[in-house]
Amino acid sequence: NRRVILKRYVTGFPSEDDMEVVTAEAPPLAVPTGSSAVVVKNLYISCDPYMRHRMTRHEVPNYVPDYVPGEVLTNYGVMKVISSGHADFKTGDFVWGLTGWEEYTLIDHPETLSKINHPELPLSYYTGVMALPGLTSYAGFFEVCKPKKGDYVFVSAASGAVGQIVGQLAKITGCYVVGSAGSDEKVNLLKTKFGFDDAFNYKKEPDLDAVLKRYFPEGIDIYFKNVGGVTLDAVLPNMRLCGRIAACGMISQYNLEQPEGVRNLFYLVTRRLRMEGFLVFDYYGMYRRFEEEMARYLKEGKIVYVEDIVEGLDAAPAALIGLFTGRNVGKQLVAVSQE
Ligand code: NDP
């Protein structure tokens, strides 16, 4: 059973060497009699920025459990059931949910798994647009940002798993949307594939305030914040009265020992802004509604989706680290095994 383990707790920027691909004993390929567990074959696993938090040891418990050195990494994935002791799942079912970064996983609590309700879509979509990143975009945009037709929307890390969907939901809602990304290739994708009204490469624009004034001469109503620090500082003075900021993530800060300060918070007061942090876990309750709506958009071609798939567990550590250098173009995932 090939698996990816955490070698040591991480401080600062993570490296591939903080993880190791090892061979361990496989779980029994048939669940023991009387057990309600399932054994799954992992097909696709998702690489997500929040995994970085789990690689650090926290004195005070974090919002997700820390990984343990020597143990397999866990995250969401798409799996095939190969043996089941649970009435809701049978051999051959495709499911998505929390699993291990390994070939086969024994899942003691299969009630945490979800069925794949739209097998006509690519299975890998259930690591992204049809799973938590998609729900993050949907709940964050509609529930937290409360958009109206004609709103001016700015999205950072816009070509990634979450950002590409937020931008397209904004267009469906009738908003004007501009995204920032870290390469010309990604900027091109935003404009030509995802239908953003405009986009810019923030690495080529050292004066972020000036660039925001250029793209939003009338100001920003909604900022979907995937990046923290200096980006937020530049956005705040460019927000319109009663603007909304969905604090979804702060990827620029995750590897810093000392997070950057934000100087412009007083704009929250003077512009009557609402900045709301949220976790996708808060919105599980709307998953089924989201799943049906997103499946329809994808099938009608109203939402397009770009994935960055690497092959095999050996490529997984580099793929995860690549989220923090911007190596991924679209949703990063790993294809572990064939169906
Ligand atoms: P992405 O697919 O967008 O991948 C991460 C991207 O972030 C990189 O490709 C890179 O794009 C950008 N990035 C990396 N480092 C920096 C940096 N120092 N400064 C600016 N940009 C950087 O990831 P996701 O879509 O999965 O996640 C996007 C954000 O949403 C993250 O902050 C994540 O933590 C958050 N999130 C929050 C959830 C919640 O429940 N609140 C749930 C899911 C995600 P580029 O080349 O453009 O710089």
Image (tube, rainbow, N blue to C red):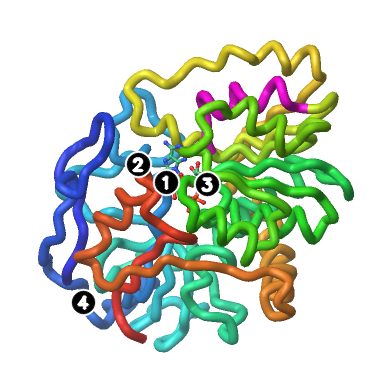
Residue contact at pointers 3 and 2, CB within 8 angstroms: no
Q: Which residue is mark 2?
A: 52
Distance (Cα) linking label 2 and label 4:
30 Å
Q: Is mark 2 within 8 Å of ligand 1?
A: no
Seen at 47% across and 67% down, the residue is 307
Q: Which residues are magenta?
A: 227-239
Judge whether 59 appears above or below 203 on screen: above
Are discs 2 and 1 less than 8 Å apart at CB?
yes
Q: Please tell me whether mark 3 or mark 1 is closer to you in this view.
A: 3
Residue receiving disc 3: 181
Q: Which mark is residue 22?
A: none
Foreground pick, 171 / 145: 171
Q: Earlier in the sequence, mark 4 or mark 1?
A: 4
What residue did someone put label 1 on? 49
Callout 3: CB less than 8 Å from ligand 1 = yes
Going by the image, does 269 lie left or right of 327?
Answer: right
Can you give x and y, in whole percent of width and height, for residue 48 in the image?
A: 42, 52
> CA–CA distance between discs 3 and 2?
20 Å
**Is residue 337 in the magenta section?**
no
Looking at the image, tell me whether mark 3 or mark 2 is earlier in sequence order: 2
Task: Provide residue 67's location: percent of width, then percent of height.
Answer: 28, 44
Q: Residue furthest right?
A: 149
Q: Nearer the viewer, mark 2 or mark 4?
A: 2
Residue drawn 29% across the image and 69% down it: 105
Residue 28, numbered circle: 4
Under 8 Å from ligand 1: the CB of mark 1?
Answer: yes
